[in-house]
Image (cartoon, helix red, strand yellow):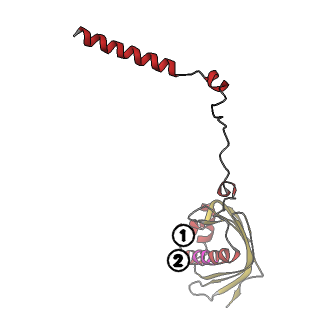
């Protein structure tokens, strides 16, 4: 058994000696002219790395007009049905609404003011000028509001409006941040 033990020890010593002799230090390798040079290069720049990321919140004018037309129709229907949650969904939390009766700031004040339009039969907006800067859409045009009260004739109010919409990222939620209504003349019986 002693000879097997000595043989194992000798083998370990031989392996350690061979591994120590086989290693060269870094200075010796750098001085050797046969050693290949190692050059570190920056990673290549691909076209996708430098391409400008597409802003998904920017839309075309046609898409903006179609979306606003839909949202104005939803707002008019929500006002006429008295759906305050749907009215609130069309405005940003810090939105402002300007009417001849005053300026109303915040969703709660806007919803309260628009809830006073009981008997609203139709609220139509016709967009004339639309401009888009980044994710802000400015829209202006004319509106027609038809109000029918119980026991009275319908009244029609015509005027101009100016609205500013903010487009939020996916799923492209649109909310109004400013809405200004400028009536032209007094309400006329229909």
Residue at screen point 63% across, 68% down? 113
Q: Is residue 182 above or below residue 13?
A: below
Task: Tell me if residue 180 can be seen.
Answer: no
Q: Which of labels 1 and 2 is toward the front?
A: 1
Percent across and percent down for residue 114 are 62, 71
Q: Which residue is rendered at x = 54% and y = 69% of the image?
A: 86
Q: Is residue 17 visible?
A: yes
The x and y percentages for residue 178 are: 70, 65
Classify residue 135 as left or right of residue 86. Answer: right
Give the quarter of the image for residue 84.
bottom right
Quadrant of the rendering where the C terminus is positioned: bottom right
Q: Which residues are magenta?
A: 69-75
The residue to which callout 1 is attached is 86
Q: Secondary structure at mark 2?
A: helix
Location of residue 164 (image quadrant):
bottom right
Residue 98 magenta: no
Q: Which residue is mark 2?
A: 81
Viewer-proximal residue among 119 and 56: 56
Q: Are marks 1 and 2 in contact (CB under 8 Å)?
A: yes
């Amino acid at each position: 058994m002693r000879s097997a033990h000595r043989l194992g020890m000798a083998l370990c010593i031989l392996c350690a000696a061979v591994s120590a002799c086989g290693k060269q230090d870094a200075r010796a390798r750098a001085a050797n002219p046969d050693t290949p040079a190692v050059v570190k290069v920056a990673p290549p720049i691909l076209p996708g790395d430098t391409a400008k990321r597409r802003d998904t919140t920017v839309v075309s004018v046609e898409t903006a007009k179609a979306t606003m037309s839909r949202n104005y129709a939803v707002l008019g229907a929500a006002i006429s049905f008295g759906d305050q949650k749907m009215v609130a969904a069309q405005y940003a939390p810090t939105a402002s609404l300007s009417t001849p009766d005053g300026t109303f700031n915040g969703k709660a004040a806007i919803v309260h003011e628009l809830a006073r339009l009981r008997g609203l039969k139709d609220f139509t907006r016709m967009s004339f000028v639309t401009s888009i800067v980044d994710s802000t859409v400015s829209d202006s045009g004319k509106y027609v509001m038809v109000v029918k009260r119980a026991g009275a004739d319908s009244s029609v109010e015509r005027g101009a409006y100016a609205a500013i919409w903010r487009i939020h990222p996916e799923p492209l939620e649109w909310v109004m941040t400013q809405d200004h209504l400028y009536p032209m003349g007094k309400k006329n019986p229909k």
